[in-house]
Image (cartoon, rainbow, N blue to C red):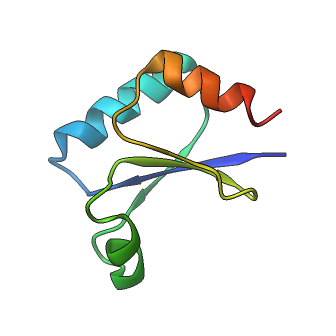
Amino acid sequence: MSHYLLFVRGEGCELCEEADRILREVGLPFEAVDITPHVSLEREYGSRTPVLREEPSGRELAWPFDAWAVRRFLEGSA
């Protein structure tokens, strides 16, 4: 069973807030992960946030994305 993480840049990130809104619109349960206190996550995702990651496969959908792109991403995870 898949679990979804949304890597974000903490509060005040407008793109991250928009990504959060899109995922809620699609009805996707996810966990938001603030990368700012984690050096390794900051290195990996810093310039790409927000990023949606499917666990355990590791597939990622990087910004920019909309509801259509998220649905297509989810179709690929079946």
From what the image shows, is residue 12 above or below residue 76?
below
Q: Position of residue 66 (x, y in %)?
A: 41, 22
The answer to which image quadrant residue 38 occupies is: bottom left
The quadrant in which the C terminus is found is: top right
Q: Is residue 42 left or right of residue 67?
A: left
Quarter assignment of residue 42: bottom left
Q: What residue appears at the point 14 percent right and 47 percent down from the top-left corner? A: 12
Q: Is residue 56 above or below residue 42?
A: above
- Compared with 41, 27 (above or below) is above
Residue 62, position as x, y percentages in the image: 43, 45
Q: How many marks?
A: 0
36 or 53: nearer the eye?
53
**Residue shown at 62% from the left, 31% from the top:** 73
Residue lying at 68% horizontally and 30% vertically, measured from the top left: 74
Locate residue 5, reporting x and y percent. 55, 51
